[in-house]
Image (spheres, grey):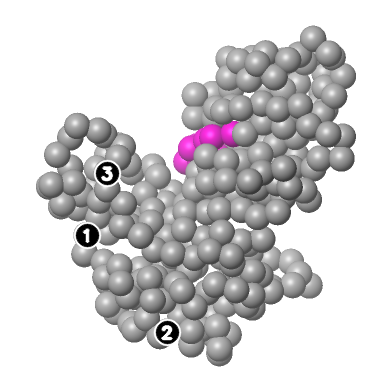
Amino acid sequence: MKYAIRLSYLGKNYCGWQKQKVAEGKAPLLPSIQETVEKAVSTLIDTETKVVGSGRTDAGVNALGQVVHFWCNQEKFTTEIIKRGLNSLLPQDIRVMNAFAVDEKFHAQTSAKKKQYSYYFQQGPCALPHLMDTTWWIQKKLNVEAMQAAVSVLRGEHNFKPFQASGAPPKMSTIRSLLEAEVTTEPMHHFPGQDLNEAGFYIVRVRLVGTGFLKQMVRGIAGTLLHIGEERRPASDMADILATQDRKKVGPTAPAKGLTLDRVWYSLDD
């Protein structure tokens, strides 16, 4: 049978999703999410097994909705056994949220219809240690209205090449379609009952939904929005980047820790 699992993980202790090629005789500095999950699945079903993810998250990037598929020829493994079994074998910073039996034609990557990423900026008098692994604390109060105006021009189909990191495959198309793009202010729901909101702590969230994303595209957009939010440059610069395709006009690549893969949609999803 073919199974799919939804993974949540913190990326700080990993080199990213994909297994890395390592020179003979040398050990990788950090393990990958993929090899860690493959080891757990292989141990659980007692068969060496490869897993396929919905996409590659870079080193340090987090996930709440990474989808992975693999094959298991043993009928005794129900979805509940798979979920509990894998969580007993995986490190605490990787969790299986759900497990599903899927059709043989299902493919975690090629069957995906759209994905949602969020970049989280932490705002407040100081950085909250509890959120340091999943947000980027910015001391200056961000102009969210300007960031909203800037991100709105990204909706639709565009050439996002200026936001792509170096090292991407040169022949790959850089045309992508963003279905949703917004910047919102979110209260601190993480710690109910606390007075954090009254004390000036909150999250600025950049949320992007698209049919596909280029390497470090979201982090390039987030870094540009940061400069706009800090009022170092006007919101109109975002449209100018798309028009001129000038990589030099893009802001800094935002740190990986603030980025989370929220969700992947498939044909059976709402």
Q: Mark 1: which amino acid?
A: Gln
Q: Mark 2: which amino acid?
A: Asp
Element type at mark 2:
helix
Residue that badge 2 annotates? 237
Please say if 123 is above or below 86. Answer: below
Please say if 40 is above or below 197. Answer: above
Residue that badge 1 annotates? 139
Q: Quadrant of residue 50?
A: top right
What range is drawn magenta here?
Answer: 7-14
Of the numbered discs 1 and 2, the one sitting upstream in the chain is: 1
The residues bearing labels 1 and 2 have C-alpha atoms spaced at a distance of 23 Å
Residue at the front extreme, as displayed: 270
Q: Quadrant of residue 164?
A: bottom right
Which numbered dot is residue 188? 3
Packing grade of label 2 (10 A; few <14, some 14-19, many >=20) is some
Element type at mark 3:
loop
Q: Position of residue 13 (x, y in %)?
A: 50, 37
Please say if 157 is above or below 219. Answer: below
Q: Quadrant of the N terminus?
A: top right
Nearest the viewer among 48 and 85 is 85
Packing grade of label 1 (10 A; few <14, some 14-19, many >=20) is some
